Image: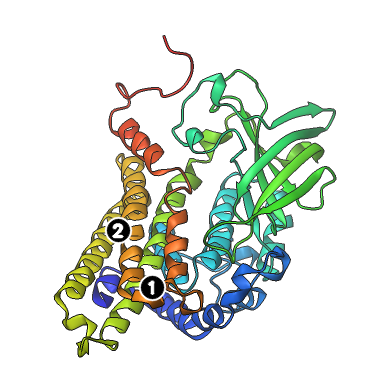
Amino acid sequence: MQQIIDRGLTEEQRMMRQTIRAFVDRDVIPFIRKNWQLEWDMKPENRPSVELLEGAHKIGVRTLGVPEEFGGTPVDPKTEVQTFAMIAEEIARGDSGLADKLVQIWKISMLLRNIAPRHLQERWFPRIADDPTFLLAHCLTEPRGASDRWLPYDVPEAMMHTKAARRANQWVINGRKQFITNGYDAKLYVVYATTKPGAGITKGTSSFLVPRDTPGLTVARCNETMGGRFMNNGEIVFEDCAVPQDHCLVQDVAMTKAGIYFKPGKIIVAAKNLGVGMAAFERTADYVQNYVQGGRILIKHQAVATRLADMATKLTAVRALLKEATRAVDAQSHDAEALCNMAKMFASVEIFQVCQHAMELHGGNGVMLDFGIEKLLRDASLFLHRDATVDISRFKIVKAMFPNTAGVYAGPEK
């Protein structure tokens, strides 16, 4: 598996990967194994792994996506998405929650450097780069609208319930966002809201940059998730939350301008998922070659050997599709939309099965909290629902392939 991972990487990417893998093996995995009980602390403020964020900061991986002039880590723009995917996989191999935290910084930084006015970049990028605990959040999902908005479709029924209205030289936001990655801990939010009701989601949605300490912004709760628990998912309430006029990043057409974020986002989700699968495979391969059952090591039992082969095959297939999709996104190919959704959907289904095999091959140890294998199955389960459910992803694939005949999937029946 190791040679397959390295194949096609540049020398710079290989060196970067080696540095990050060393960080994961030296710092992340031991921390997660030692602090497995911390995962179940119901006080979310006790869970953030500040020392891991500081470690990621020291090796420069936290500030990917931040422009180099503001203290960010430079990445070759021609292979940027490939690099993000490779690093996301390695971090998630240590812990998917940590990967979730870092990925939001990368993706939102990519978005801001492309759409934020210069004065906002000068204000916020140095803060992001200097503070190891500075987290970012992307507020799109709402209690009554989540995966359906990823299709997308332009009918009034699909528009944001969160609204923003212009008052003098300010925008005033009212609404609620739910299931927000980093939402509980973030210091800066990108918030999407309806600014032109009835116009359709791609013609009437604006995006805003909202600092955490803005009056009217309340972090209502931490959503206690099944997996990825070292990232605190949050619910955010906006009550007459006023931001300056220039904090509107994109007016009315924000969903179309955010395309630079969405496709790489799908790739990175699939890559994180692959990292969880690789952790399950590596730990299982080690276990079955050392644990004795029935007078022989487990791998010598045919039933075990066939399961291990299935796990390796699934991971290799996911990696191949992910690599193809990543190249398409970097090249801005016409089939990138379909491929990145294929990679995200396929990874979520196959990696969940890989982790199920891992848990079962560990026997009774597989379901013990202190052994750490069941954690991987829980982490993998989240990918079936995040950044669009499996079925919504399938709808998007068909929509991308057959735009003129695919169904609308929303609005009144005609």
| Front-most of residues 221 and 242 | 221
Residue 179: x percent and y percent? 60, 47
In the depicted structure, whether residue 201 falls above or below residue 21: above
In the depicted structure, whether residue 375 falls above or below residue 179: below
Q: CA distance from mark 2 to mark 1?
A: 19 Å
Q: Residue at x 29, y 21 (%)?
A: 405
The reply, left or right, for residue 70 in relation to residue 315 is right
| Front-most of residues 241 and 108 | 241
Please tell me which of labels 2 and 1 falls first in the chain. Answer: 1
Find disc 1 in the rendering and name its residue.
Answer: 279
Q: Residue at x 49, y 65 (%)?
A: 96
Q: Is residue 299 visible?
A: yes
Where the N terminus falls, by quadrant? bottom left
The number of numbered discs placed on residues in the rendered structure image is 2
Q: Residue at x 38, y 73 (%)?
A: 279
Disc 2 marks which amino acid? Answer: Lys
In the depicted structure, whether residue 227 falls above or below residue 395: below
Q: Nearer the viewer, mark 2 or mark 1?
A: 1
Find disc 2 in the rendering and name its residue.
Answer: 323
